[in-house]
Image (spheres, rainbow, N blue to C red):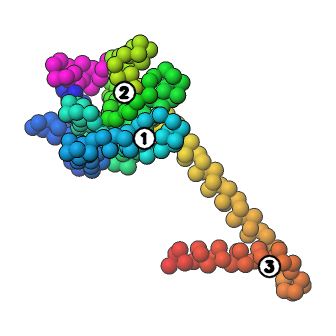
Amino acid sequence: MGFYDRDYLQQGYRFGRRPFYQRGLGIPGIGPAVKWILVANLLVFLMQVLGADGYLTNWFGVWPASWRTDMQIWRLITYQFLHGDLLHILFNMIGLLSFGPLLERTWGTRTFLAFYLGCGASGGLSYILLAALKVLPVGFMIGASGAILGLVAACAIMFPQMTVLVYFLFPVPIRYVALIFIAIGLFVIFTGGHNAGGEAAHLGGMAAGAAFVLFRRNLEELSVRMKVMIWHRQISKAAELQQEVDRILQKVHDHGLHSLTWREKATLRKATELEQRRLRGRS
């Protein structure tokens, strides 16, 4: 897949002072996350070609053979960097370069990287779950397709007018491409067709990608509300502490320091420590 007719990218998607869309080849600038994901995939594939394929797949591919391998959480990340053959990695990396830079520029490097790996992990979990339920046979699963299909789902929701070249033949709106992948995945899984485990990863990655986009705003609003609640609570506690300190100081003035209980002395020490921290923070 690749970008096609991306006029909307020329109409205001900017990063800093540099336009997001670069003329010429029409390829958006590659951010650090996309670059290092690409490099890591190529290096691991080179290791596979040089003879380490069996070892890497055995220890780093998703393999729901038992509860022990299911608990090897690293597999949910590492399997995304393994590929079966040249075409497998080629199409996945084309997908990464087609959709990754746009999303990385939109969200930032950290969010994009977490999103990419999270979609891939969700794909791996989907396969493990369906294998545990005996819906799919147990075997090794490798590939970045779950993560890539997560990118497709996100772009289909955020940029539904985007068109892509399907296998370099004809342009199709990305929202239809996403629906086609969903339909194919469901059909293959429920008919027990070839690469049903891979299709489970595709759907799991797409579900995670769609959920992130659809609920991200709600999560951000919830995060802001939680921060406001914590701030109000801290302000309230500070006011209560100040009232208690004022009462204790008045007691000292009226009856002397010896009249304080151990709890009141502890309160004064706490207030003193907080004030010292505040003053150090200003210096």
Residue 148: quadrant of the picture: top left
* Left or right of residue 208: residue 11: left
Amino acid type at circle 1 is Leu
Q: Residue 27, percent across and down?
A: 17, 38
Q: Which mark is residue 198?
A: 2
Q: In terms of secondary structure, where does tag 2 sit?
A: helix
Going from N to C along the chain, the mark reached first, 2 or 3, is 2
Q: What residue do we see at 75% from left, 64% from top?
A: 240
Left or right: 8 in relation to 156: left
Give amino acid for label 2: Gly
Residue type, label 3? Lys
Distance from Cα at disc 2 to Cα at disc 3: 65 Å
* Residues in magenta, as a range: 161-177
Counting residues from the N terminus, which is met first, the one under dot 1 or under dot 3?
1
The answer to which of marks 2 and 1 sits earlier in the sequence is 1
Does residue 154 appear in this view? no
144, 55: nearer the viewer: 55
Secondary structure of the residue carrying numbered label 3? helix
Residue, disc 1 = 76
Where does the N terminus fall, quadrant-wise? top left
219 vs 239: above or below: above
Q: Label 1 to label 3, Cα distance in Å?
A: 53 Å
Residue 186 vs residue 210, the one in the foreground: 186
Residue 173 visible: yes
Q: Residues within 10 Å of mark 3 (few under 14, many from 20)?
A: some
- Residue labelled with disc 3: 265
